Image (tube, helix red, strand yellow):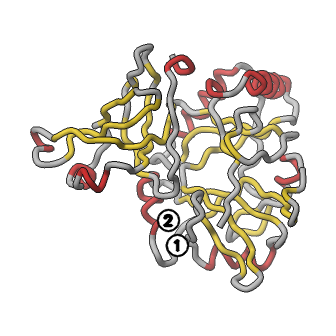
Amino acid sequence: MSVLVHKAVEPDNLSVAGKKRFEGLVMSLIGGYDDVIVQPKYDGVYAQFIFDSKLGWQGFSRTGQLLKSVGQEILDPLHAFGLTERRYMGELWVPQEAHQVINGRARKQSPQWLELKLFDSVHEEPHGIIPEQYAERYDYLFEGGNISKAPNLPMVGKVFVLDDLYDQAMALRNRGASAYDGLILRDANGLFVPGKGTNGEVIKIKPRSEADLRVVGTTRGIGNRAGGIGALVVDLGGGLRNEVGTGLTMKDIAEKPKDVIGRIATIEYLGVTKDGHLREPSFKTYRFDKDEADTITPETED
């Protein structure tokens, strides 16, 4: 199954045009205009819902895998109210649960208790996607199980400086477990562009940076990790590698290295030094819904 993704990008990784757009969106927020929509970034698992004339609505992961964990409490509203010519995108999410728990539920081969937080939709015809600004696409959204306009409405109150956005992101991140991951800024006039959105239509604001990196090795554990994995060795790209041991659970430590190497691991970090070392890296989870790794370049992070 072909899945469409318009990836959110952090400000430092935007193109020149994207950074100019980002500046304009921030100025719009400061001015109190409605050219930008601010949403919480739900730290869940990406899902896309597509209508099949024989099978009805089905959920798929970012890599096109059928999500059997999606239950009728999510699918029934789509059957009742979803427009069959549209694709719906959202996050499978559970309040007050860490991403690792949500990720595990989403991988199950039977229906699980999950919430659906829709954030986008596109009108698709045989010849391609119909161009629609986000403000138009937003009108087609609802929260699975509750037929109403999506509750992730524009942020209340005026943004006075850019730091306010990072403060808001930190406040969300500190609420409960890690079920929130910061903020998403969307250009209300932006189009859906499949691929990595470096032109700034969708921007993520996070208190810590995050990347999905390929595990290329492990180190041997010592002390209370003796006999297990001490740290993951992740590939940053460009010949750079980094060890990450913080964040591994005892279950992660007990895994066999051969079963870990090749996986995509989500790593959080505060920044990157000029010689290519992650600052305070921490393992977050393995991504079953991605098979393409990110790369990190010190020039854009330091």
Callout 2 secondary element: helix
Residue 114 percent across, percent down from the top left = 55, 67
93 on left or right of 30: left
Residue 270 percent across, percent down from the top left = 45, 25
Q: Nearer the viewer, residue 236 or 209?
A: 236
Badge number at residue 69: 1
Q: Residue type at mark 1?
A: Ser
Query: Mark 1 or mark 2, which has the lower sequence index?
Result: 1
Callout 1 secondary element: loop
Name the residue located 81 percent from the left edge and 74 percent from the top edge. Answer: 81
Q: Residue furthest bottom?
A: 54
Name the residue located 41 percent from the left edge and 45 percent from the top edge. Answer: 265
Q: Nearer the viewer, residue 21 or 78?
A: 21
Q: Nearer the viewer, residue 273 or 143?
A: 273
Q: Are marks 1 and 2 in contact (CB under 8 Å)?
A: yes
25 on left or right of 256: right
145 on left or right of 140: left
Q: Residue type at mark 2?
A: Ala
Query: What is the crowding at mark 2: few (fewer than 14 residues within 10 Å), some, or many (at least 20)?
Result: many
Query: What is the crowding at mark 1: few (fewer than 14 residues within 10 Å), some, or many (at least 20)?
Result: some
Q: Is residue 186 above or below residue 158?
A: below
Q: Which residue bears the numbered disc 2?
A: 106
171 on left or right of 120: left
Which of the 4 image quarters holds residue 226? top left
Q: CA distance from mark 1 to mark 2?
A: 5 Å
Which of the 4 image quarters holds residue 166? top right
Badge number at residue 265: none
Residue 277 percent across, percent down from the top left = 38, 22
